[in-house]
Image (cartoon, rainbow, N blue to C red):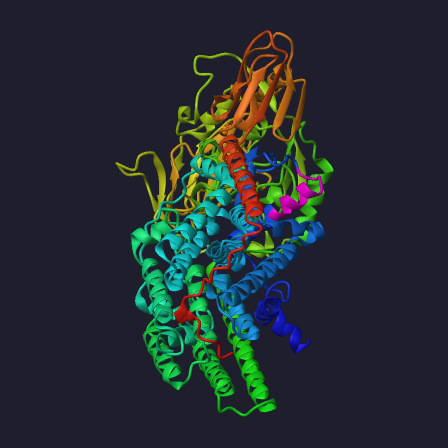
Amino acid sequence: MDRSILRSRPRPAAALLAAVITTTAFCAADAVARSYPFGPRTRAVNDLGNQYVPFHAHLWDLLHGRADGGLLVNWQSGYGSSFLPDLGTYLSSPFALLVALFPRDEIDLAVYAVTVLKTACAGAAMAWLLLRLRPGRWWAAGVLGAAYALCGWSLADASYNPMWLDGLIALPLLCLVGEWTLAGRHRLLGVLVVALAWIANFYTAYMATLGAGLVLLLRLWLTGLPRRRALAAAVRAAVTVALGVGLAAPLVTVIYFGTQHAYPGRVTHFAPVGTDDLLARLLPATYGFGSPALYVGTTALLLALALPFHRAAPRRVRAGWSVLVVAVTLSMQWTPTHLAWHAFATPNGSPYRQAFVLCALLVIAAWHCLSYGPPGPRALGPAAGLLVLIAAVASRSALVRSVAWPVLLLAAAGALAGLALLARAGRPQAPPGRRRTVLASLAAVLLVTAQLGETTATSAVATRLRLDHLDDYAPWGTRQQRQADAIARVDGWPAYRTDPGREQTVGNDPLMVGGQGAQYYSSLTADVLSRTLTALGDGWTSRGRNLQSLDNAVTDAIFSVGARVHSPPDPHQRWNPQDHSPPTVSRQDVPPLVTVRPTRADAHTTVSAFGPSPYRNQELLLGTRVYTVPRLTTGPVTGRPPQPGDDGTALRIDAPARRATGPKPSLTARCAPGSQVYLWAPHYSGTARLTGTPAPGPTGRFTADPAKRAAMQPLGTVPASGAVRIDLTPSRAGTVPDGAVGCLDIARLHAAVQRLKATGATEVSVTGGTVRAQLPAGSTGTAVLAAPRIAGWRCAAGDGPAAPAGQYYGLIAVPLDGSATSITCTFHPPGLRLGAAAGGASLLILALLGAVGAVRGRRGAHRPEPHPSTTHPRERTPSAL
């Protein structure tokens, strides 16, 4: 590229270089770690595999017209869930739309490409910001921009939470908005940038807005503007943010009200990490899930440490940026400010999600050090001493592994050598002409190489260690394709539902492979859904927000599940790696989605009306007694009989069996021959098998701990003798409740289904967020829609007025008086009208301000004023670069 072009357009050149370095290091690290798509190791860990990839797959289906539902209702998950809050939480980034360009069976690659692109854009945005804050060498801005994009927070946390990367992009863009408000320019563009940041991911945009606000306050102090002009700039910035957030309100308010109706999950309390762990995360090749990932590269860290000692920079600049870095660091460790960073709610999981703000401040401080001329020995010496001190304190942390030291030494050597060469090239007595260019070029090569090398190592270490600490899931492959094909062959929505099956591949199987099931995993899983399915015997993980499929004939009848996929256990989860048999599909006769129940005194009841037994709760929803719940006799070997105070515990298992042979804990009972046996043991971990039958039944696998609850499972058919014996093989301590076994009378269930079909809807249509059902003439009682009664549903019987839907044990209910032959239920997410009103008001105010500005511009067209400088006289030192 022509050097004159680089001098005339340094910001685009710096942004491009930052993007290239970022992309190269990111992909090289995955190649070194042999991670997808450059190796056999999956990168779909934790929520990336369980939530984000499936939601992007659902977005792909929406964009291609293949999804069940629309923007308002997702009919594939949780028997019908509100989708707009999930869209705003996981999919509202403009980058997410790019998944539509990839094949459906390459959805993992699509999400990876979006992740790389977002990270590269964050580096480009930071490089652009740095040159807007201070002039300097374009390539140095590119290197530091990449250092920000590849900071520890990005590599260790956000790389598998791709929606957080929108906050990484938003922070430098919001700082640019602050610069525009200082200069009184780009007011409309500033509002649009704020709105886009909050739409893309409101969670990290909130933190980025706080960080950009701190940067703006410091800039106001550094510029030395008169108090009145500084106050006017601050007001402009506040108005810009308010209008931008207002434009994003239709999505933000829906998410807010979605969280209000969500299952509460886990309540956590913040505990700051020790100083050694805090400092350890500044170093390369360190990893820890619960500590702040503050790595920004050794070059950037050395420059930030050198800033207080770099006398070429004005004293106010040195003091201001150094104090801000220290203050934000301390704010991460103090509970009140920690809560302020996280919208006053300690997050589940990593408690340092605002760490990217501190990473940005370190990079900006480093740029201010470098932009006033490369620091010499008087500044780099103390900085190197501080780096040694940090390393010495960090060496006491278990987060520093042996690989970190050679990476740190090589990176420090490269950084110090590169900065020394750059300082020599910038001296007045430096060799002129070509030799000075050679020195600067060699310095650039050293700094870029050091950045690439240590960042590649840091990212590779994080990628490998995540697999050891977090659950992981296989990318799309033969198993998922077989599931999708099996579902496509029998899918009959909305006549009946098709459940992807109990043996799940990820927590959101319906979004990945199709169908309409109970499975659903989101931060916004509705409280009423979780409590209803739990009362019916369902299991969950993530403390109630990751609901599982419930393989039960009664609940299949209640929720109109007419087809169910049965797959072998996922070989990737190592239950049975050799079982690659194809899935099978079972069909059952079920009522329609809308049924009519007779009026009873307790017909319109909430979930709180359920009792402790899931078998009796299922009967309440079905309307017929179909279970026998026999008295149990226990045969404990590794457990003990129930003791006084155990409150309904039939068997307490103190420890797993130590030997594979010999007697095992068992449950015995008597039931009618031919009935179907179910076991409900929500706090038991291990396997269960019905013995003494002519044909072996399925082996039930149960997993429970404080964050998981095991689902009810079928075990087979009662033999002709009527004797039921269930052998247990526990994997950890647990309990089996009294009333754990239920024997289902299949004939009674069939009769109940026929009655519900005879009185139920004759026709059901589902269009997006609207359900219409035709009913037999003269229907009285309660029409029940087999979907959870989440907030936002309104229903009307016949031509009557719409009213908030009633509730029938957690499901949508509409009272009937015999005159209506149809019902219509429509869903509107809570908060959408309020958000639309706020967005409309913001748009109106923005239009009025634009009109006033245009009028003033015409009046002042012949009286131009000189552009006010936003640079303090003490900042006007010519750049040595």
83 vs 156: above or below = above
198 vs 115: above or below = above
Quarter-wise, where is residue 290 in the image? bottom left
Q: Position of residue 681 (x, y in %)?
A: 43, 39
Can you see residue 162? Answer: yes
**Residue extending furthest toward the right:** 489
Which residue sits at x=38%, y=69%?
317
Q: Position of residue 330 (x, y in %)?
A: 31, 61
| In the image, residue 58 lies in the stretch drawn in magenta | yes
Which residue sits at x=55%, y=45%?
859
Query: In terms of secondary structure, what is the magenta stretch mainly?
Result: helix
Can you see residue 401? Answer: no
Q: Nearer the viewer, residue 608 or 317?
A: 317
Q: Position of residue 491 (x, y in %)?
A: 70, 35
Q: Position of residue 548 (x, y in %)?
A: 52, 41
Instruction: Report the label total.
Output: 0
Magenta region: 56-67
**Residue extending furthest toward the left:** 644
Classify residue 556 as left or right of residue 103.
left
499 vs 289: above or below = above
Q: Nearer the viewer, residue 691 or 125?
A: 125
Q: Quadrant of the N terminus?
A: bottom right
| In the image, residue 64 lies in the stretch drawn in magenta | yes
